Structure formats: structure tokens, C-alpha cells
Amino acid sequence: MLRRQLFRFLVVGGGATVLHYAIYLVLLLLGVTPVAASSTGFIISAGFNYHLNRRYTFASRRRHAEALPRFVATAAVGLALNAAILAGLTQLGLHPVPAQFGATLGTLVWNFLLNRLWTFRASSASSSSKEKALQ
């Protein structure tokens, strides 16, 4: 189950990352600073990420009213991590594109673990129902 979820997370995340990077590169070409360009791409791709991870990766039955605020909180911390890593790497002199790769890798583990263990995890009511059904 974990391997399948991780694989699906990477597939969905790959699509979201392509969207994120496309926005990032266009905004860089327009003269937007790397952190602002990346943050914009991150936020826009988060909507894509939420819907596909909820449905495809984690097959969550958690109601949107529960899952969406959790996803937003997880994504907000991921956004802050992404921005901090990107800012740090560019301040060290790394070009913005490879710096963004580093920032993406830095947020990948955070996003997977929190989304798996908290955002899309079955609610305790449905978990206890499953446990009772197995007994």
C-alpha cells in the first residue's frame, strides 16, 4: 500500500511539478523574483495536487470540509519550506532553476508524509467502522 501510494504521489506530484515549473519559468522570464515566481507556481499547482491526490493517490473518503483545510495547512508549510530553501540556495549563488530543484526535493518528503498521515487519512469514525467490520 505504501509503495503504491508513494508511486501515485510521485506521478501526481510530477504533473503538479511540471505545472509549477512552467509558471515559474514564465514568471522568471518576465522578471519576477525567483521566490515570488516559485510561490505563485506552487500555489496554482496546489489545486491540481489536492484533487488528484485526494482521489487517485490516497483514495480518501474524508469530506472536503475536513481534508481541504488540512491540505491548505500542509501546503502552506510546504510553500514556506520551498521559499526558504529556494531563497537560501539562490543567496548562495545557485542559479534559480537548479535551486528550484533543490527546493522541490526539500518539500517532497514533508508533503507526502503529512498528506498520507494527516490530510487524507481516513477519519477515526471510518477507521473504527472498518475495525469493527473486521472483527
Image: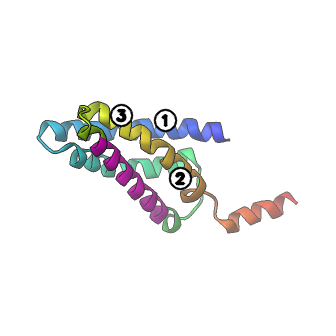
Question: How far apart are the alpha carbons under marks 3 and 2?
Answer: 21 Å
Tell me, for residue 107, which label it has, or none. none
Tell me, for residue 11, which label it has, or none. 1
Mark 1 falls on what kind of element? Answer: helix
Q: Amino acid at mark 1?
A: Val
Task: Compare marks 1 and 3 and give the one earlier in the sequence.
Answer: 1
Q: Identify the residue at image location x=11%, y=40%.
A: 30
> Badges 1 and 3: C-beta atoms under 8 Å apart?
no
Q: Which residues are magenta?
A: 68-88
Question: How far apart are the alpha carbons under marks 1 and 2?
Answer: 15 Å
Q: Residues within 10 Å of mark 3 (few under 14, many from 20)?
A: some
Measured as percent of width and height from the top left, residue 122 is found at 64, 59
Task: Compare marks 3 and 2 and give the one earlier in the sequence.
Answer: 3
Quickly name the residue at label 2: 115
Mark 2 falls on what kind of element? Answer: helix
Q: Return the residue nearer the eye: 56 or 19.
A: 19
Measured as percent of width and height from the top left, residue 105 is found at 43, 37
Does residue 37 show up magenta in the picture? no
Measured as percent of width and height from the top left, residue 8 is found at 54, 38
The C terminus is located in which quarter?
bottom right
Q: Nearer the viewer, mark 1 or mark 3?
A: 3
Quickly name the residue at label 3: 101
Q: Return the residue nearer the eye: 109 or 17.
A: 109
